[in-house]
Structures are given as structure tokens and as C-alpha cells.
Image (cartoon, helix red, strand yellow):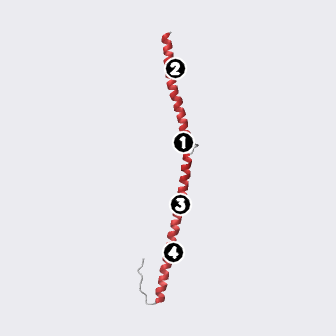
Amino acid sequence: MQPVRQSSSPKLAEAELRDLLEANLRALHAVFEDHQRTLAASLRKVTELAAEIRAIGTVEAPWVTALEQSRALLYVALREVIIGSDAAATQAMQRKRT
């Protein structure tokens, strides 16, 4: 920023002051527009993130379905291991009796 000079004419000083104030107003307006754009972009991003969080939290979310399927698969596999080994033990015991 340039220092304000003392001018010899009051009209010249008034014109310089007007130019300085107009330049300041233009700069403030540019900063205001930049802040508006930044706020609008931030609001869009927050809205997108809120929608994604809502989608993740629903019961129909893909990760919930995958978890349910994995749980079911593990249940069946464990059941096969437990019942299968019990069945094998039972058959072995029956063979020893005969």
C-alpha cells in the first residue's frame, strides 16, 4: 500500500482519497466473492459427506449385506466342523461296538 501524500490542492486530495476508497472497495468485494465461493464449496462438500454417512448407516448398505453373508458362511462352516466331527466320532464309536 502506498503512503498517502499531502497534496497541495484540496480537490486533488479528495480525488486521491476517492480513488483509494474505490480501490479498497474493489479489493473488499473481491475478498467477499472469494469467501462466498469457498463457503459454497465447503457447503457442497459437507452435504455430500452427510449423504455418504447416511448411506453407510442404512441397513441396505453393501457392507452390512457382506457382513451378514460372511456371518452366515462362518456359521455354516463352523456347524459343519462341529457336527461333522461329532458325526465322525459317533460313527467311530459305533464301529468299535460292533
- Where does the image place residue 27, in percent across and percent down from the top left? 49, 73
Task: Give the Cα separation between the discs numbered 4 and 2.
Answer: 86 Å
Classify mark 1: residues with Cα within 10 Å, few (<14), some (14-19) or many (20+): few
In the rendered structure, which amino acid carries the disc numbered 3? Ala
Circle nearer the N terminus (4, 2) = 4
Residue at 51% from the left image edge and 69% from the top image edge: 32
Residue at 47% from the left image edge and 83% from the top image edge: 16
Disc number at residue 30? none
Circle nearer the N terminus (2, 1) = 1
Classify mark 2: residues with Cα within 10 Å, few (<14), some (14-19) or many (20+): few
Decide which of 43, 30 is in the foreground and name it.
43
Circle nearer the N terminus (3, 1) = 3
Q: Secondary structure at mark 4?
A: helix
Mark 2 in CB contact with mark 1 (< 8 angstroms): no
Circle nearer the N terminus (3, 4) = 4
Circle nearer the N terminus (3, 2) = 3
Residue annotated with mark 2 = 87
Disc number at residue 26? 4
Task: Give the Cα separation between the discs numbered 3 and 4.
Answer: 23 Å
Q: Is residue 61 above or below residue 15?
A: above
Q: Is residue 47 above or below residue 37?
A: above
Task: Give the Cα separation between the discs numbered 3 and 2.
Answer: 64 Å
Q: Secondary structure at mark 1?
A: helix
Task: Give the Cα separation between the discs numbered 1 and 4.
Answer: 52 Å
Circle nearer the N terminus (1, 4) = 4
Q: Nearer the viewer, mark 3 or mark 2?
A: 2
Disc number at residue 63? 1
